[in-house]
Amino acid sequence: MVRKTKIVDNFTSEIPEFLDARSLFLSGGSTPRDYLETCISNISSSEETVRAFSHYDLAKARTAADASTLRYRDGCPQSPIDGMPVGIKDIIDTFDMPTQMNNRMYDGYMARADAACVRAVREGGAVIVGKTVTTEFAIGRSGPTVNPHNPLHTPGGSSSGAAAGTASGMFAASFGTQTQGSIIRPASFNGVVGFKPTLNALSTDGVHPLSRTHDHLGVLGQSVGTAWAFARWVGEIAPGQDTNGLGGPLASELDHVPVKRVAVPRTAGLDELDDNSRAAFEAQLDQFRAAGITVVDSFDDPYLADLARRLDHIVDISLRMVAFDMRWPYRTYVERYPDEMGPRLHDLVKLGHEVTLDEYRLMRSERDDLRQRVQELSRSYDAVVLPSSSGPAPEGFEFTGARTLLLYWSFLGFPVFGLPLMEVDGMPFGLQLAGFRGRDFELAQHANWMMRQFG
Amino acid sequence: MVRKTKIVDNFTSEIPEFLDARSLFLSGGSTPRDYLETCISNISSSEETVRAFSHYDLAKARTAADASTLRYRDGCPQSPIDGMPVGIKDIIDTFDMPTQMNNRMYDGYMARADAACVRAVREGGAVIVGKTVTTEFAIGRSGPTVNPHNPLHTPGGSSSGAAAGTASGMFAASFGTQTQGSIIRPASFNGVVGFKPTLNALSTDGVHPLSRTHDHLGVLGQSVGTAWAFARWVGEIAPGQDTNGLGGPLASELDHVPVKRVAVPRTAGLDELDDNSRAAFEAQLDQFRAAGITVVDSFDDPYLADLARRLDHIVDISLRMVAFDMRWPYRTYVERYPDEMGPRLHDLVKLGHEVTLDEYRLMRSERDDLRQRVQELSRSYDAVVLPSSSGPAPEGFEFTGARTLLLYWSFLGFPVFGLPLMEVDGMPFGLQLAGFRGRDFELAQHANWMMRQFG
């Protein structure tokens, strides 16, 4: 399968599905170096406009791809992601490339060691193409990436370069991080797959923090299979603390497991949709019904209706928890480098000062309670569906899109796939398929089926 | 109360108890600047021999003490630790002093922000005297600190400077960290109080990691009251994730709550004691009995006997978990800087390669099971007592002392106070008072009573 993304000036980039290419690596029909050269050709033609990278190193990538090529030739690939060209979001440490957080404080900063997840990439023999653009510290000022579907529109944030670079065929997948909406939203805007695993399924060691209660390491990828293979490997080598990684077998390809029953909680976040996006979402639900999926609306299920109200309630709570968590290290940053820090960072630190430890503890116990309630849904539903954003990518670059529909699962720490299923006004528009805590593998199998049925 | 520590060449340093001094700050009878000058005088006379600091800045400390003096004069101290001179173990980030891990890789390294706990110190108005010597990355090569009770003996590690500097009256307390035995052992060797709280009660953000499952931030202090006041404040401003800090009120002084019943699990770790130390420990237990405390030996309680066997079993498990956790970032360190890394670090990284994720998961579930079994003891006992080390500080500097008796509580994540209650061969020898998970406040009240009764 070849995904086509319309790039600026009607340029269309093509990148073969990595899992298909890998079969050819194994049979000798292609090599990781060949595959990388396709990515490099896309970088050559698109990067000047798209600006997905804060830094890249094609010589190093070619060396890594050549080493991978030899391993496949010898029949000994190191992992299911050996030879996969990947991007690393620029808040994630790499010892051989700068990690700059899109903030001048970190201009040219070289970490002494790779982040745990980057270490996993290297141990798997994947090919690091470069560091992908993040918004400032993954929450502040945007830029300079544009949306490859229309360069006057935002790519979304904060994993801007990860999403735009995947859409442009510059790599097969990239690490992203999501504190509130930073993986699933840019996945939606760029028409790629986003996967935010269960909180802490993947280690965030060596990832610059915003909020220990909300920060998720995840991936953006060209397909569910590629995203899963990438994340699954990282979960094997660099699982988060007190978690069991992602579950499921390491090596084999994902099955397609039919989704039979989904919940649609009608939260206030849905009111943020424009008319065309709402119509697209309802049409998508109709397609599901037509395919035999039972779609249960919160209007028809009192338990779900109650949950929807509770989800509405956490919009403020989530931000206050994040702001409180941000006391470290951002209080010191704004005091020491006030002029370097964007206005949103100043605002969040100020908000963090308002939150007391007692309030924080209450919010945490509210979260624990809500986690149990949402996990209960797994008795009756395969997944929960909502749009991945309030619409397609808005024009301009200041506003990277609403977060309301996204932060529910970030607050709860539940796994989500963002699926590029819809289109509105000629731009991509994603669907969120949310699963249950610690059951990432089941969710991936459902997401895989969803894309085959409706993608 | 004035603690006297015999320093080399019969020098005796004196430092008033901080909590007593604080009453004088409030009444106008003394000032934080006066108190600091006593510490500085001890530094002047002892630091050349003791070498507790990797870096110190007396000008900055005086400025901070003067600011604190003004706050007390105005009747507005910022916290219960306002004006407390403290040391910061040199694996903990400070933005205004180098953080060097006792390894050349980090020579002159300046962090961009304070660790969360250091931020808490500053927000409380405590006076940072300097960075205290750690063994290499808190687990490797030792030096250059010596034991102030006898300069030919080790101060213990890895919180070497924290313990020796507290004993020498250079500060009232210091941050230490304990992965297996690194707070309680040097506390024992230097005759000071050590407090290792429940795992993650205090944030380790900005502390260079060894093992996310074992790393504890804690304190060494001149007394139980000072250590508690320091840790309690840090737990308020910088609690660890998913914990509720330390519990107990913030401001008032600790009560003395009698210990009525203690458990003594006769683990194999006790076989490591030399004869004099064993005699001292048994004499201490006799003192407890004479004071009316019920001392239950594992010989007389089958549940306890079973626990003792299980504790023996975790000695290897604990080290294998630590080695596995150390994959990040130490695998990258030993590959990139093989010549900079001491032999023990090479060995541990090699050991970590032997541990599979499946084994690691099994070890974690064994830990979870044992946690429940040990927590069950809280129904019958106030605390568990064991020696803090296998004896007093050994001569020489290579060997910083056995870890066996210490790692039980590090593995479990349970709180421990190390109390300077015993003396062997003219050197200090500590007693561990271990409490129950999340019940640090109760333990501190018991420890406070213990020191008043037997100290």
Image (cartoon, coloured by chain):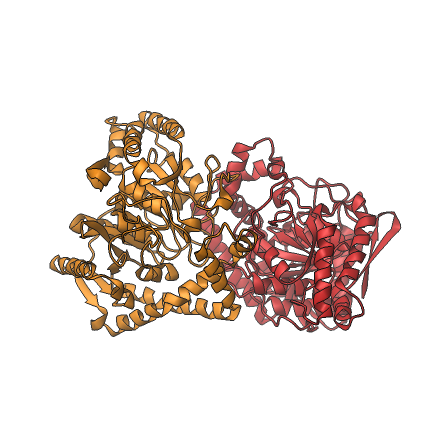
Chain colours: A red, B orange
Residue found at the far left of this picture: B290
Q: Residue A88 versus residue B320: which sits nearer the camera?
A: B320
Report the quarter where the N terminus of chain A lies. bottom right
Q: Quadrant of residue B49?
A: top left
Choose between B47 and A274: the one closer to the eye. B47
Instruction: Please indicate whether residue A432 sits to the left or right of residue B174 in the image.
Output: right
Q: Is residue B222 above or below residue A170?
A: above
Q: For residue B17, what is the image quadrant?
A: top left
Coordinates of residue B397 in the picture (x, y in percent): 33, 50
Q: Residue B328 in the image: state x and y as whole percent.
A: 53, 56
Direction from residue B241 to residue A346 in the image, left or right: right
Q: Residue at x 70, y 50 (%)?
A: A130
Choose top left, top right, bottom left or bottom right for residue B72: top left
Q: Is residue A309 visible?
A: no
Q: Is residue A98 above or below residue A265?
A: above
Compared with A261, A323 (above or below) is above
Side (left or right) of B252 relative to A248: left
Quadrant of the rendering where the C terminus of chain A is positioned: bottom right
Front residue of B454/B349: it is B349
Towards the viewer: B41 or B94: B41
Total numbered labels placed on residues in the image: 0
Residue at the location (77% across, 43% down)? A395
- Residue A49 lies, in percent from the top left, at 80, 44
* For residue B444, above or below residue B294: above
x, y percentage for residue A436?
Answer: 58, 65
Tell me, yes or no, if residue B434 can be seen here. yes
Q: Return the residue found at the far right.
A: A10
Residue at point 51% right, 63% down? Answer: A243
